[in-house]
Amino acid sequence: MKQKPNRHKLGDFMEGKGFYIVLFLCVAAIGISGYYLFSGLFQQSGGFGQEVISSVSGQADLEDKASTQTPPDPAPAEKDQDTAQVKPDPKPAEKDTTPAATPQKPQGTPAEEPEAKPSSFVWPVDGNVERDFSLEVFAYDATMGDWRTHSGLDIGAELGAPVNACAGGQVTEVTTDDMMGVTVRVDHGRGMESVYSNLAESVNVKAGDQVEAGDLLGTVGTSAISESASPSHLHFELVEYGVSIDPLHYLEQE
């Protein structure tokens, strides 16, 4: 029997089971090659990711350190400039030797109150007391025809007799009262005032004038309607803090 050549045997083997064996070996080789290929790539990519993370972390640490560092002190030259700006001028200021102007008191302003009110007053007019001061006991009023109080003194004097200030002070009012006629009021300070009524129409002072004891205020008249039945006289009052007081307690006694 004639034998087949070897190449014919190999062809028969490949046509039979040998084909499947070769195919399996190729597939296995491809699988093994793919496994090692992907394994190497994964290891490389993992290492690159770690390097990137490490780089980012290091950059963040550098920024934190930079933000916490204390800024350096200013340069010595800048400090010297600041010191030079606040350095006082060694030259002392010249003293002003010009005398201060004495303020002048404007005319018509209220008078300053004296250190103490007068302890005694001069008589405003020469004459005798015709009617006394009486606030607690009623006295008969011939003009009004009734019994009433009397807040001052009626000092008898001829018409036109001069009426003088009983003490220094400032004239605060020159008015015409419906009942007491032409009236001048003088403020002597410390709550003390003097009142002169039943004057003639013409007076020598006005509100705001400064007067001294004995200065002429006006003259005796007949302007007080409420005392027209009485002889010619000056109605004179002293008022302390708004309350009428007896002038005889303050007028000088001869």
Image (tube, rainbow, N blue to C red):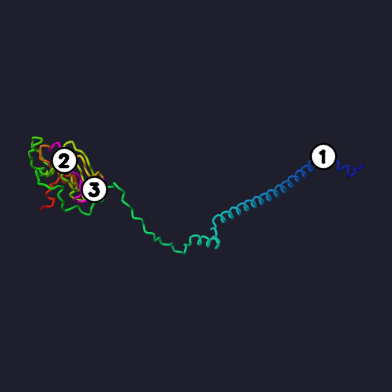
Q: Quadrant of the N terminus?
A: top right
| Mark closest to the chain's N terminus, 1 or 3 | 1
Q: Is residue 226 magenta?
A: yes
Structural crowding at the residue carrying mark 1, measured as other residues with C-alpha within 10 Å and reported as few (<14), some (14–19) or many (≥20): few
Residue matched to label 3: 170
The residue mark sitting in front, 1 or 3, is: 3
Q: Is residue 32 left or right of residue 2?
A: left
Q: At x 16% / y 37%, what residue is drawn?
A: 179
Q: Amino acid at mark 2?
A: Gly
Q: At x 30% / y 48%, what residue is drawn?
A: 107
Is disc 2 placed on a helix, strand or loop? loop
Residue closer to the observer: 190 or 186: 186
Counting from the top left corner in percent of width and height, residue 135 is at: 11, 42
Tell me the CA gap for discs 2 and 1.
Answer: 171 Å
Tell me the CA gap for discs 2 and 3.
Answer: 22 Å
The residue mark sitting in front, 2 or 3, is: 2
Residue closer to the observer: 156 or 251: 156
Q: Amino acid at mark 1?
A: Gly
Span highlighted in magenta in the image: 208-227
Q: Is residue 11 left or right of residue 175?
A: right
Q: Is residue 179 magenta?
A: no
| Mark closest to the chain's N terminus, 2 or 3 | 3
Q: Is residue 77 left or right of residue 174?
A: right
Q: Is residue 105 left or right of residue 23?
A: left
Residue matched to label 1: 16
Residue matched to label 2: 221
Tell me the CA gap for discs 1 and 3.
Answer: 154 Å
Considering every residue shown, the one lying at the far right of the view is 2
Is disc 3 placed on a helix, strand or loop? strand
Q: Do the numbered discs 2 and 3 sit on residues whose CB atoms are within 8 Å?
A: no
